[in-house]
Image: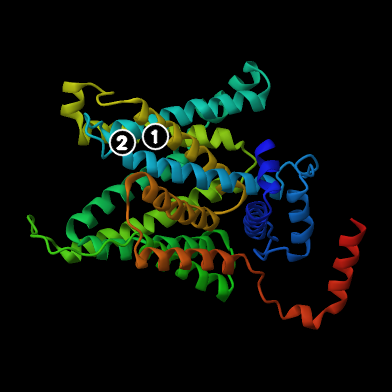
Amino acid sequence: MRLYRSAVSDTRAGSACVSLLKAAALFFIRLGNRNADGRPDQKTDDRLLSSVINQRSVMASEPVSVVFKLYCLTVMTLVAAAYTVALRYTRTVSSDLYFSTTAVCVTEIIKLLLSLGMLLRESGDWGRCRSVLVSNILRSPVELLKLSVPSVVYAVQNNMAFVALSNLDAALYQVTYQLKIPCTALCMVLMLSRSLSRLQWFSVFMLCGGVTLVQWTPPQATKVQVEQNPFLGFVAIAIAVLCSGFAGVYFEKVLKSSDTSLWVRNIQMYLSGIVVTLIGVFVTDGAQVLEKGFFYGYTPWVCLVVLLASAGGLYTSVVVKYTDNIMKGFSAAAAIVLSTVASVVLFGLQITATFLGGALLVCVSIYLYGLPKQDTSRLQKPSADAEDTQKLMAA
């Protein structure tokens, strides 16, 4: 609070900071505050933004308020950016390199333990928590198998992405792999019956192009050591893109189609995730892990990466539960931009015109997606608008 007051005391820095906070709050509120048909509830944007700035207790009256969604999206973006920076550091320092497969496995275990802790807190005591686990895990193998689908599909996606990268040049891979963003939107339309306006579709494809430019690296004339198969690469990238969209939307559908606790769903998914990642450890690095040890190369920085990945995974599930996968994609894009900017300061990465153009596209796409849909029925039914206004004023 002292830092906030000291910032406001400086007129220029304070006003800029407050304006930035207001803009960020308004963006996430517009994204999170949606009606059942997917259109932003423009009428309550100003009231909710005022509540955010004045720090009113909106959450006290709503278990899942817009403020809560704003908080989750912001934390998810910051954690993802910090994770990317920390991961880049651990893979570039001159020390014994750890096995990335074991780090992924440990991350799944930590997410499982954290979800168990949250379920215990939600249940109130160990007896209730145990009964919930027994009824939803031991006595519900079908539900357990249902949540194993995303883990298996994500494993297929990662392997297909590796095959695609091995058979396509890096530039082509970067462009085609970002098609997972519009593919996710298409899966939401088909699987969740969501409707997107033309402007929102345009913003989704703009985001796809922006992320591609942000991550773009100029192609280099290097000698290919292994013969590449472009057709196999395109097939693999198509499968990876479809898997990415399907797995995310499938998990969202499971979360929102029943009243089962979010933490129970997480536990069900992480149990299968641990099995899948353990298989990945022994298939990919089995011999070296047996020789050097499971935690070979682990440092405090590696532990930080694992903790950030675990926290990011939990916040991702919360965001998917209470918003949707498209918003998760926008958050991930913002995290990429933030992590790249941080890399400029920490690692001396040079900003290029391509990055600036991509970052601008990302920001514009976020703004466009948050705009309300154009609804011609408003011109035909003024009485409905008047009634809504009266209800809003009465509230």
Badge 1 density bin: few <14, some 14–19, many ≥20, Cα 10 Å: many
Q: x and y percent of residue 8 in the render?
A: 69, 48
Q: Earlier in the sequence, mark 1 or mark 2?
A: 2
Q: How many marks?
A: 2
Query: Residue 205's mark?
Result: none
Three-letter amino acid code at disc 1? Val
Q: x and y percent of residue 59 in the render?
A: 75, 42
Q: Which secondary structure lies at badge 1?
A: helix
Badge 2 density bin: few <14, some 14–19, many ≥20, Cα 10 Å: many
Q: Quadrant of the N terminus?
A: top right
Q: Which secondary structure lies at badge 2?
A: helix
Q: x and y percent of residue 364 in the render?
A: 53, 68
For the residue pair 372 and 8, the one nearer the viewer reads as 8
For the residue pair 315 and 303, the one nearer the viewer reads as 303
Cβ atoms at labels 1 and 2 below 8 Å apart: yes
Alpha carbon distance from label 1 to label 2: 8 Å
Residue 1 appears in the picture as rendered: no
Q: Residue at x 34, y 59 (%)?
A: 215
Q: Give the side of residue 238 with respect to residue 40, left or right.
A: left
* Label 2 sits on residue: 90
* Label 1 sits on residue: 305
Q: x and y percent of residue 222 in the render?
A: 11, 60
Residue 112 appears in the picture as rendered: yes
Residue 44 image-quadrant placement: bottom right
Q: Residue at x 36, y 25 (%)?
A: 300
Q: Quadrant of the C terminus?
A: bottom right
Tell which residue pokes out farthest to the bottom in this image: 380
Front tag of 1 and 2: 2
94 over 55 or under it: above or below: above
